[in-house]
Image (cartoon, rainbow, N blue to C red):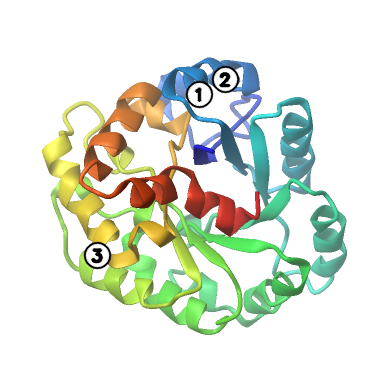
């Protein structure tokens, strides 16, 4: 099974999606399962993991409805107020849904780069393991030191790093990101999504040569066993299209063995999300 481990659906409104600014008008519309399915068929992708965007419980219900109506959606990563002392009841409700696989908080947007180290947030994260839920780490590269300390606090929790920690690809800045990503990868309980690279570069002028060192770094750091393909559709449309991105990943991993390529294209996601 080939799996896209990271994509989104939404019903667009300017109020709820205020982060989509004037320069991102390609995203000023609804993106629903029927919009994605043709691209999946052309790319030979069998299933997806849909990931939250708005940080509301209502978002979980919307994504679960999409998953119920669309066989290709194999899992949902939602959101819950992890800093709320009473969050366990929310977690238990959603964990009872077979397609609900985990949670994400948009830590990249928190004013405090050490948000992941808050005691109340970590108390909420400690509830996930017993419910079989993963936690997805969404950060900018400057937050990697905090993410390393955060993962160290939860050695038995499964984590998935989004978008290779958003390095400054547009600045061709391999360091200090590369050293920090290698350090994070030493923690065996964290997987990494090969997604979101082109949108960290110049949307109109990025090149494959520019992003290749970043792909090679995570291949070396995490290895195929803990690396998984993701499209970040429809956000990727700011800089590429679905077919182009799958082609770039296909070329980047072509030097690997067949078994290693199968891990990146699906095996890792199947393992991480219990698909």
Q: Which residue is mark 3?
A: 177
Say if mark 1 contacts mark 2, CB within 8 Å: yes
Asked if residue 240 can be seen in this view, the reply is yes
- Residue 54, x across and y down, in percent: 64, 42
Numbered circle sitting on residue 37 = 2
What secondary structure is found at the residue carrying circle 2? Answer: helix
Numbered circle sitting on residue 203 = none
- Residue 190, x across and y down, in percent: 47, 68
Q: CA distance from mark 3 to mark 2?
A: 34 Å
**Which tag, 3 or 2, sits closer to the chain's start?**
2
Q: Residues within 10 Å of mark 3 (few under 14, many from 20)?
A: many
Numbered marks: total: 3
Q: Is residue 216 left or right of residue 72?
A: left
What secondary structure is found at the residue carrying circle 1? Answer: helix
**Which tag, 1 or 3, sits closer to the chain's start?**
1
Q: Please name the residue shown 36% across and 27% down the image.
A: 238
Q: Is residue 229 left or right of residue 73?
A: left
Residue in front for this viewpoint, 166 or 220: 220
- Residue 202, x across and y down, in percent: 21, 35
- Residue 20, x across and y down, in percent: 47, 32
Residue 187 is drawn in which quadrant?
A: bottom left
Numbered circle sitting on residue 40 = 1
């Amino acid at each position: 099974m080939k799996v896209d481990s990271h994509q989104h659906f939404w019903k667009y409104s300017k109020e709820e999606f205020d982060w989509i600014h004037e320069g991102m008008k390609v995203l000023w519309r609804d993106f629903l399962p029927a919009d994605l399915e043709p691209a999946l068929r052309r790319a030979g992708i069998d299933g997806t993991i849909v990931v939250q965007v708005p940080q509301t419980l209502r978002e979980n219900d919307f994504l679960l409805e999409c998953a119920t109506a669309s066989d290709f959606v194999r899992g949902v990563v939602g959101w819950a107020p992890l800093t709320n002392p009473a969050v366990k009841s929310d977690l238990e409700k959603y964990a009872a849904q077979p397609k609900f696989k985990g949670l994400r908080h948009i830590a990249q947007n928190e004013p405090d780069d050490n948000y992941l180290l808050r005691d109340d947030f970590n108390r909420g994260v400690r509830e996930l393991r017993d419910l079989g839920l993963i936690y997805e780490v969404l950060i900018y590269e400057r937050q990697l030191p905090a993410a390393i300390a955060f993962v160290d606090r939860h050695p038995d929790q499964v984590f998935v790093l989004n978008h290779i920690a958003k390095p400054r690809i547009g600045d061709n800045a391999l360091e200090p990101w590369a050293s920090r990503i290698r350090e994070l990868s030493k923690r065996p309980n964290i997987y990494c999504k090969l997604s979101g690279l082109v949108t960290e570069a110049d949307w109109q002028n990025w090149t494959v040569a520019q992003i290749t060192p970043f792909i090679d770094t995570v291949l070396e750091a995490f290895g195929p066993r803990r690396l998984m393909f993701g499209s970040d559709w429809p956000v990727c449309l700011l800089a590429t299209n679905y077919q182009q991105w799958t082609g770039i990943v296909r070329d980047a991993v072509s030097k690997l063995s067949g078994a290693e390529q199968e891990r990146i294209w699906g095996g890792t996601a199947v393992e991480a999300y219990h698909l």
